[in-house]
Amino acid sequence: MENLQSQNPLNILMVNWVWFQVGGDWTYVDNVRKLYQGKGHNVIPFAMKSDKDFESYGYDKYFVDFIDYKKLNANKSIVGGVKALGKSIYSKQAKINMERLLSETKIDIAHLHNINHYITPSILPVLKKHQVPVVWTLHDYTLICPENSFISHGSICEKCKGGYFIQCGINKCKKNSYMASSLAGLENYVHRYMNLFKHVDYFLCPSEFLYKKFYDFNFFRDKLRLTNLCFNFNREALAAQEKNDSEKYILYVGRLEKIKGVSTLFKAISGLDIPLKIVGGGNLLPEFQAHIKENNITNVQLLGHKTLPEVYNLITNAQFTVCPSEWYENYPFSVIEAMSFKKAIVGARIGGIPELIHDGETGLLFESFNADDLREKIIKLWNDDNMNKEFGENAYKFISNQVSYERHYGILKDIYSNLNVAL
């Protein structure tokens, strides 16, 4: 990244539910933080408190208390549950702490990320009261789908279109629980009723698919802006990887959950003489472990969680990677990372994935949920080294420009200029 310092450094407030590495969304949060700082701006974080927090520059005194929903569910405490419910819909603490922060610190612009359920939109009126311009990067579909992924009982569902969030409860979309689903729908109703989103100047959409989905759902159409994401191409990290030709395999990196399509990948790879390595954990891990043992499957390895250098090493030595997703993926970093290592990808034709994987150019697309189609594409790419190499080179050229720091900064710069904020 070209490190040209801004002549007018800004104080940029970055708001996210956590301030440490967790999930793919943090990859962007951390990258855009580094982008702002690399341009000479000051990043001021606002999140939940945790002993895992990265450097908060002393602003953790404004952070809100951590909510551990797993512990609350385990304790089954009614009092604790009611308190958590209130905080997850409208956090008075977040509102009060934001007021303190803005009263004591000049903020030029606020860049929001994942704030639902933890920070909550309660902070939006406070930001507007202090005349702080607000942009919100949409990482998922929570604002138009209470379940957040448009998945209900393993299938795509858009019944909440038109603001009919009661459908989430009726269909028990969230955790197959009437209570959890009804509360998720209630959260969306409350935020709409309070008209909190009017305080956001622009909603940033990383993928064209997500942009079109929010537009189709008539969500603040005049405030939607198509962007992309940024990714730090650490050339030293890429160059440090050692190529090992002693084994040949394909690779999946990601959570082991139904919506990620790993079950379909298992069906597709079954009986093939093609080794598959799977990196990641999730609620389906015990099921897959049992399946491998019971069926004496020898071509699939479950590697569990790996460090980032270990993941990079596995990508480096893979023939290609697979993204078998079965939900409306936004702009998956698992695909972006593989492409940065000059890897071709077999990916599902769903969500924003086709915006990264150009069929027959940077990889191969298959029909989501279709194990036979996935199997065919895996075999095709596995047996054609020239195609594999060509796709990998094309993938690298495409992604190097598509999510570069400079391109993303230029997009943000144009958007912010409309808010009279000069990056």
Image (cartoon, helix red, strand yellow):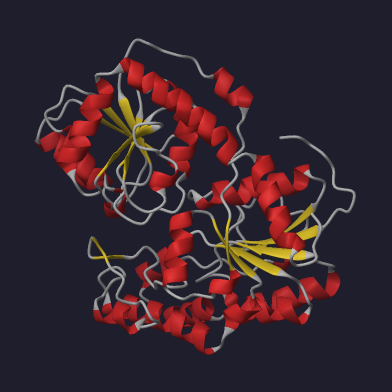
Q: Residue at x 57, y 33 (%)?
A: 400
How many marks on residues?
A: 0
Quadrant showing the N terminus? top right
Corner quadrant of residue 213: bottom left
Give the residue furthest to the right. Answer: 7
Q: Position of residue 83 (x, y in %)?
A: 49, 81
Q: Nearer the viewer, residue 66 or 185?
A: 185
Q: Residue at x 72, y 68 (%)?
A: 62
Q: Nearer the viewer, residue 282 or 379?
A: 379
Can the viewer see residue 33 in this picture?
no
Can the viewer see residue 293 in this picture?
yes
Q: Residue at x 22, y 38 (%)?
A: 374
Corner quadrant of residue 423: bottom right
Q: Position of residue 57 (x, y in %)?
A: 77, 54
Left or right: residue 417 versus residue 74 is right
Left or right: residue 25 versus residue 166 is right
Q: Nearer the viewer, residue 332 or 242?
A: 332
Q: Residue at x 62, y 30 (%)?
A: 234
Corner quadrant of residue 212: bottom left
Q: Position of residue 347 (x, y in %)?
A: 33, 40
Q: Nearer the viewer, residue 375 or 87?
A: 375
